[in-house]
């Protein structure tokens, strides 16, 4: 029975893999450089050399005026574009209704023109045969001229409506423009947030590279931090289980950006 339990345990580990808890003790060579993601002036410095820091602790702040202004301007452009897009959507519905009406009126005018033209041709032939009078022919001609005028007005009205629709489509923002403005707002928010610099890990400040009122650029190192020892969980896949032994030393890399 004991042998069977051992076999089952090995099978479970082999199928699922195992998770190991390792005590990782960092030394002074295991450090990170805490860099700024924005340029600006250091207005607050909340750490000093050899002082401990916690993950998420604020270590420094840069001036925010430029990035607040950038965010405000980006937000105003977005709000204005979204307002215009809403108005243009309402206008588009009105224009579509006007287009349908103008097309219907043109179709009606064209039908009247064709009927008036047919009547005039018939009256003209009948007048030659002496069937209708000059007055009847004159009335048919007058109706034809009225029909032509109505048709021309209907055609002009349809063209005007089409031009109005084109102007609205041309002057108002489209979805791609709105998406671009949304990105600008999000980028401005990130920049403003990055004026507050925090430690990504627990550790100790080995070196401080800035002081109050210093002007820094994006990518400049604020401080060098030695990482504290910590317990780290690693998953060992099933095909690696046979390679792991109790007390075995291991080497690994960390990415401070994640």
Image (cartoon, rainbow, N blue to C red):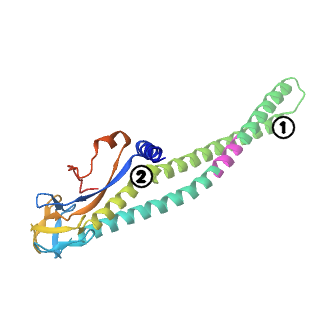
Can you name the residue that lies furthest to the front here? 1
Provide residue 132's location: percent of width, then percent of height: 88, 31
Predominant SS of the magenta segment: helix
In screen coordinates, is 15 left or right of 126? left
The residue segment tinted magenta is 97-106
| Residue 101, magenta (yes or no) | yes
**Numbered mark located on residue 165 in the image:** none
The spot of residue 249 in percent (x, y) is 20, 50
In terms of depth relative to the viewer, which is nearer, 256 or 101? 256
Q: Residue furthest top?
A: 129
Compare residues 113 and 51 and report the one nearer the observer: 51
Which secondary structure, mark 2? helix
Q: Which residue is mark 1?
A: 135
**In which quadrant of the rendered view does residue 107 lie?**
top right
Q: CA distance from mark 2 to mark 1?
A: 64 Å
Q: Quadrant of the C terminus?
A: bottom left
Horizontal side of 160 relative to 258 (left or right) equals: right
Q: Position of residue 80 (x, y in %)?
A: 43, 63
Q: What residue is shown at x 28% (from left), y 67% (from top)?
A: 192
2 or 1: tag closer to the N-terminus: 1
**Can you see residue 174?**
no
In the figure, is residue 244 to the left or right of 106?
left
Quadrant of res 119: top right
Residue 117 within the segment the image draws in magenta: no
Circle 1 crowding by C-alpha within 10 Å: few under 14, some 14–19, many from 20: few
Residue position marked by numbered label 2 in the rendering:
177
């Amino acid at each position: 029975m004991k042998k069977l339990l051992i076999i089952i345990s090995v099978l479970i580990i082999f199928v699922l893999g195992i998770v190991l808890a390792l005590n990782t003790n960092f030394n002074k060579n295991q450090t990170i450089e805490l860099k700024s993601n924005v340029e600006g002036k250091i207005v607050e410095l909340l750490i000093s050399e050899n002082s401990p820091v916690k993950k998420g602790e604020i270590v420094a702040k840069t001036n925010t005026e430029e990035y607040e202004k950038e965010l405000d301007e980006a937000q105003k452009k977005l709000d204005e574009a979204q307002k215009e897009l809403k108005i243009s959507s309402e206008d588009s519905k009105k224009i579509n209704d006007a287009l349908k009406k103008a097309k219907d009126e043109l179709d009606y005018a064209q039908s009247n023109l064709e009927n008036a033209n047919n009547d005039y041709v018939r009256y003209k032939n009948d007048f030659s045969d002496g069937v209708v009078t000059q007055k009847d022919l004159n009335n048919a001609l007058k109706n034809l001229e009225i029909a032509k005028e109505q048709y021309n007005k209907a055609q002009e009205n349809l063209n005007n409506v089409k031009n109005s629709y084109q102007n609205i489509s041309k002057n108002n923002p489209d979805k791609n423009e709105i998406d671009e403005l949304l990105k600008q707002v999000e980028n401005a928010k990130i920049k403003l947030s990055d004026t507050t610099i925090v430690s990504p890990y627990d550790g100790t400040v080995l070196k401080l590279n800035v002081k109050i009122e210093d002007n820094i650029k994006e990518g400049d190192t604020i401080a060098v931090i030695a990482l504290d020892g910590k317990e780290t969980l690693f998953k060992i896949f099933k095909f690696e289980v046979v390679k792991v032994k109790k007390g075995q030393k291991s080497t690994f890399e960390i990415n401070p950006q994640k």
